[in-house]
Image (cartoon, coloured by chain):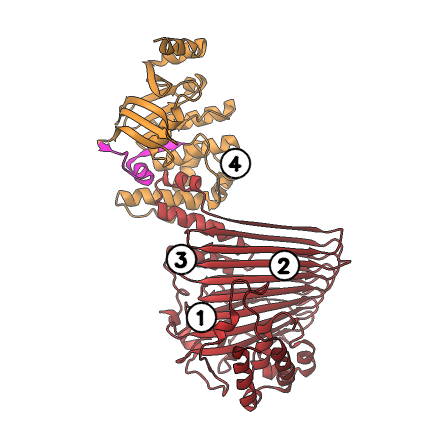
Chain colours: A orange, B red
Amino acid sequence: MLEIKNLHANINGKEILKGINLTVNAGEVHAIMGPNGSGKSTLSSVLVGNPAFEVTEGEVIFNGKPILGMSPEDRSCEGLFLSFQYPVEIPGVSMVNFMRAALNANRKYKKLDPVSASDFLKLMRQKRAIVELDNKLASRSVNEGFSGGEKKRNEIFQMAMLEPKLAILDETDSGLDIDALRVVANGVNTLRTPENAAIVITHYQRLLDYIKPDVVHVLYKGRIVKTGGPELALELEEKGYDWIKKEIDGE
Amino acid sequence: MREIEQQYISIYQEHLNLLTAPACNLLNEQRFAAFEQFKAQGFPVFGSEDYQHTDVASSFALDWGMNLNRFDFKVNPYEVFSCDVPNLSTSLYFMVNDKFYHAQEPAAKLPEGVFIGSLNNFAQAYPTVAEKYYNKAISTDKDGVAIFNTMMAQDGFVLYVPDGVVVERTIQLVNILRSNIDLLMNRRLLIIIGKGAEAKMLVCDHTMDAAIKFLSTQVVEIFAEEDACFDLYELEETSMQTTRFASVHVEQAASSNVLVNGITLTNGLSRNNYYFNLKGEHAEATLCGMSISDKQQKLDTYSHITHAVPHCTSRELFKFVLDDQAVGVFSGRILVKPGAQKTIAYQNNRNLCATREARMYSKPQLEIYADDVKCSHGMTTGQLDESALFYMRTRGISAEDARMLLMVAFTSDVIDFVRVDALKDRLHKLVEKRFSGELSKCEGCAICK
């Protein structure tokens, strides 16, 4: 589904990604872990087309199409979704208008008619329940005045509405208490199918107790330096990152 | 005296008989006084403190036609303006250029004692009331265009709501600019809201002939007596060829509440002056407005709020969205006079420049001569939030649609000030249409098709 080959990316002339290689197949959940500043969030930003980053080398194939030349909106319509680490507040734009615009843009891309008002509200209600999101949030401005937990649940709600093929969850666990974490993780698990896939970026093993990964990668200094099964996450939780740093920096 | 003023002084002197013939004595008396003032003062001087960015005199320099003979223009607005604003069900009245349209009036009955009609008729029917109020809210030393209007006005529109009367239904006045030649007109509105009385009014400006140049001077006087409550919503949807020099003069007695909301959707050059005089304690004034300007449109807004007595509140919010080479100007003066303690005055001006060529000039001016007051002002001019744009795009929303959603959102709080729900919904939709380019003029009505 997703194939990243030798991806290099800069921000303000500083190289952050130094040759990422990663393949994600349908039905899989990949966890990407790593110490602060290793390039985890940069990777997710580059994948969804954040213009702040410059790709200098490599390619990304998503569903057989090269996507690095695509606009962020086209990548979304192709089925790529990012749950933001810091969801953006948009004062004055209601969740309803925002979500309707997003859903209809996705439908238009697939040459489908806009969703009817009643179907849309039904869909909102259904998907809201998955993350136990309050009805009142729908009429409020996007993320404005939402608590940290509400913002993250709102991200998963949007994911439920858009039904992406590949979801990237960028530190969705940061800023969440245990209850909110469980709600969010349940939401993600509910949305899992054999046809879609997810990349979970996290610092901690904790989230992976709820969202079971098939593959765990360690990102360090802009490269994937270790790949293993779920047991790798447990090992990191126990021993920290120092042993990996030594292994790599010692080379 | 400059050549331009001399030109209008000559017109006045040569055609004084024509000017005075259709007008009542009250208008003519005030006219003679205004003429003397105009001779002394002339039009506002370009480059002077309050006219840094708009050259009034040059707009008058064109070879304008004037309808001093008061010929009727061939138009029946009730026929061409077939749509009422849906779901709003207003009491609908028309002015064609500067003339109240008499031929037909709305079916809905007004409450007992309420007068809506022409200024000349009003002066006949209510001579003492007319004399008490007409031209009394205008601080003559400041506004040369208002003086010119008084000097040239031959009739006008009056809304008079006597003490204690509440007009439930929103009054809508549609001004239609209609001519075959380039036309200068002088429109005059007098609004008197008696003690404890209430009314709401929507004034829409439409240009019917987009190829014709129009220059319209407009003076609105509003008197809100004790405990009166009044809303004025102004909606300008004219043409690139229309120049509007407007002033709204508000006098508020104790515990009165007045809201003025000016929305400019399409225009050419507009200068809107707003003067509020809070003369009675516990009076509340809300002044807000927004404009969506593109191409070479220009809106110059000037406000002057005087807190003359203690315990009054004024709130002010203006927002400009400027695209292409549009120019916006906001100068807001708040004057708190000595002794006007416990004044609360907030002023806010927020602007978006969508291109590098768009220009915004903003100037807050607070003059405070009392020491126990809460006054503040804020001003920002900037671009759309890039992080919000990116966030929306990652959800599939095109860059263009995302910009539009953000611009609509930016102006929505000005419309939220509207205290008539149906009108508020309508305006939200009109603004969306304006941003999406679907609206070059007002929607739905026959004159714009």
Closer-to-camera residue (B139/B27): B139
Identify the residue position indicated by label 3 in the image. Answer: B433
Look at the numbered disc 3 and give the secondary structure of its residue: helix
Mark 3, Cα crowd under 10 Å, few <14 / some 14-19 / many 20+, is some
Q: Residue furthest right?
A: B339
The subunit carrying tag 3 is B
| Residue A216, placed above or below residue B31 | above
Given contact means CB atoms under 8 Å apart, are the residues at marks 2 and 3 in contact?
no
Chain ID of residue with mark 1: B
**Amino acid type of the residue that numbered disc 2 sits on in the rendered structure:** Arg
Amino acid type of the residue that numbered disc 1 sits on in the rendered structure: Thr
Counting residues from the start of the chain, the first of labels 2 and 1 encountered is 1
Rendering coords of residue B146 (x, y %): 59, 73
Looking at the image, which residue is at 33% across and 38% down? A72
Residue tagged 2: B333
Instruction: Choose between B213 and A226: the one closer to the eye.
Output: B213
Q: Which mark is residue A146?
A: 4
In the rendered view, tell whether residue B132 sits above or below residue B276. below
